[in-house]
Every structure is written in structure tokens, then in C-alpha cells.
Amino acid sequence: MARTSRLSGLRSLAPAERRAAVAAELGIGTDDLAAFLGGGIDLPQADRMVEHAIGTIGIPVGVATNLIVDGREVLVPMATEEPSVIAAASNVARMTRATGGFTTTTTGPLMQAQVQLLGVADVHAARARILEREAEVLELANAQDPRLVEHGGGARRVDVRIIHGRDRTHLVAHLVVDVRDAMGANAVNSMAEATAPLLASIAEGRHLLRILTNKADLRLARARVRIRPDDIGGPEVVANMLEAGALAHDDPYRAATHNKGIMNGVTAVVLATGNDTRAVEAGAHAHAARDGQYRSLSTWERDADGSLSATLELPMPVGLVGGATRSHPAAQAAVRMLEVTTADELARIVVSVGLAQNIGAVRALSAEGIQRGHMGLHARNVAVSAGASADEVDALAARIVAAGAVRADVAERELAALRASR
């Protein structure tokens, strides 16, 4: 039977039944997803991962359904505390199935390390001297990680930047490194530290900072999707989305919230797979300001047939080798669930989920408003915080939604009324 991510009815199942349904579709045992229970790690494991560990904190992990990425059906684990994120991504993914889902490209796994050079009298001549000895620098860099070189990666080139600042001129050498299936921070940092003395000697100065840049603009992932007007709410909704997209492009205040919606999806997948959420977020927001003004990361257009055509480009420094991706059992389960074998495949899925989530948020804003769906899902959290027991949560959530006031004081009042009526 052909694989599908179109798992309807998950919402009505209990969590254990959902795990069973996902496992059955993936052709794996439910034990393969058991790491999602209890947070995935115990205190001894946490103590090995970070310093001064005193415990762990659990984040809900859900599954986004309906996604087709480059022709492949994908079930996507998402770790997030925010209601409506997973539902929105799944709903938009359903809308895209009629037009083939998401199409993606990537630029390859190139990361950069910076070596800051100080006390250089002739920065332009120093730049030329460094480039003349590029082969020597690359040889020294690659000697730091022969295993990476064996797998087809390694330092590829040296770029040298002269930056004219407010009160000084900076000379910065960049090592451009193919990190293969790693996120790459450790590899490029080691290379930067090893080559810094040589670079300083060539420049006839001294070195200071030796570290990667999270502005990973040589490691981009792109996704595009097309949704027919009838599948997203009609031509008026498409037109409203275009207006919303135009504001996000022109106004940093709107762009910040627009891009936060993208990162709701992106960060949830990055976190679920044990990758560095801060690195991805830093790179994304730097990319949003690449022309000097902070703008929307996604682009909205209407194609020749009147359909919504949406695109997204993001730096995507994620990996499958090293770090929590290999040491955290829940992250390993997430990778198995995604059925990815390379960092490139993971990056393509992440950017697709980000675009799906962005479309969902902008569609809600352009149609019924964001609060209707979001607060309906948030009502369960409010019900729990008001003291509802497991068998009271759904009934109380329904009451406060019907009252049009998803607030703690209303939940407490309605909970008392619910209990008095029994």
C-alpha cells in the first residue's frame, strides 16, 4: 500500500491511538515512538548533556499531517507549546495536495567561520596576501577534520572581507566549509582556531575572534507552493493575503509578527529533531534584514490562474550528525519518523513546514481573524489552568468558547457552574 500523510481523524483519537496510527503508516512499531513519552530523557541523561542540570522540562510533541514535499508523503513531528500551530500547518498542507504539495531546493551545506584580524596596517594588501596563500590555509583547516574530508566535506575556500565601520576598518577572513550532514559549528570553529595564527601571520597582525557566523546565507533552503482559490477560501481571501504580504514586506512591525508565524513551524521541527533552534532563528532574522530593512521572509503572489503562489527562502543550518540529534532519544525518534537520511532532506521539510504555517496564519488573518481558531484550541489550556479534571476539560473548553471569552476568570465561573449542574 502506498504511503500517505493524509491521516484524517487524529484529533478524535487518544494520544496512544495517534502514536499507533502514525507507527502503522510508517511501518514501524509503536516502541520506535516511545521516546516521545516522558520527555525522552531522564535526569542522568540531562546531566551528561548540560552543566548544573537539575531536571528536565517537557514540551508537547505533535504530528503535522498531509504534507507532500518534493513528491514524498511526510509525517512531521513538531515540538511546541503553542496551540493552533500544528493544526494550521496540517490544514494548509491539506490545501496544497491538489497541486502537488511543496517543491524545494537547497544550496548545499556550506557554513562559514570568521577570523577577526587586528593591527593590520595595510588591509587591502593583507587581503591579497591571504588569498595568495589560500591553498595553504585550506590544507591546514582540513587537517583538523580528516573524517569530514573522507565523507566529501571540508574547507572549500577563503573569503576576506574589509568592513568600513563607524570608527575603524575591520579585516575578517571567512573559512567556507562543506559540513555535509552536520550542523557544522564544531567543525568550522576548530578550523578557525587552527588557522587563525597562520592568517594573522600572513596579514602581519594578530587574531581575536575565531568562530562561526550564524548568518548562514550560503546554506539556504527554499520552498514554493501553489494553492487554488477555491481550496483556500476564494479569490477575496487570496487578494487579502496579498495585501497582508505587501504590508509585511514594507513594514518591519508587521514583518516581525509575519516571520514569527514562519518560525512557529520552523522552530517546532528544529526542536523536535534536536537541532539548534537559536542558530536557525538568528540566521533567519538576519536574512530578513539582508537589504538593510527587516522584511518578510516569504513572498505572496497571484499566478496566471489566480492561485496563491507562495515562496520562502531561509538559511537552514540543521544536521543529523552530532549534538542532541544523536544523543537525545526523542530527537532520534523524530528523525526516524521523518524518514530522512541527510541534513539536506531535513532542511527541505523544515522550510516547507515554515511556509505552511505562515500561509495558515496569514489566511486566518485574512479571513475570520486569528483569534477564532487560536483561542478555540487555547481554551483547553485555560480549562486545565482553571482546575478542570481530565473528564471536565473538553466540556469546560466548549463552554468558554461558546461564551466568547476564553479567560481564566470565565473558566473558573463556568467550571463552578458545570460542577453544580451535575
Image (cartoon, rainbow, N blue to C red):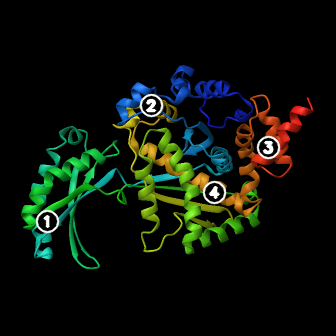
Specify whether residue 73 is in view.
no
Q: Name the residue under label 2.
A: 332
Q: Where does the image place residue 312, in percent across and percent down from the top left? A: 52, 59
Comes first in the chain, label 4 or label 2: 2
Q: What element carries label 3?
A: helix
Q: Is mark 2 on a helix, strand or loop?
A: helix
Q: What element carries label 1?
A: helix
Q: Name the residue under label 4.
A: 359
Callout 4 amino acid: Ile
Q: Mark 3 points at which residue?
A: 411
Q: Where does the image place residue 229, in percent across and percent down from the top left? A: 72, 60
Q: Count the marks.
A: 4
Callout 3 amino acid: Ala
Q: Which of marks 4 and 2 is in front?
A: 2
Specify whether residue 256 is in view.
yes
Crowd rating for badge 1 (residues with CA inside 10 Å; few <14, some 14–19, many 20+): some
Q: Which of marks 3 and 4 is in front?
A: 3
CB under 8 Å between callouts 4 and 2? no
Crowd rating for badge 2 (residues with CA inside 10 Å; few <14, some 14–19, many 20+): many
Mark 3 → mark 4, Cα distance in angstroms: 31 Å
Q: Is 23 or 59 nearer to us in this picture?
A: 59
In this rendering, the answer to whether 188 lies above or below 200 is above
Q: Is 165 or 344 nearer to us in this picture?
A: 165
Q: Mark 1 points at which residue?
A: 131
Identify the image quadrant of residue 8. Answer: top right
Mark 3 → mark 1, Cα distance in angstroms: 67 Å
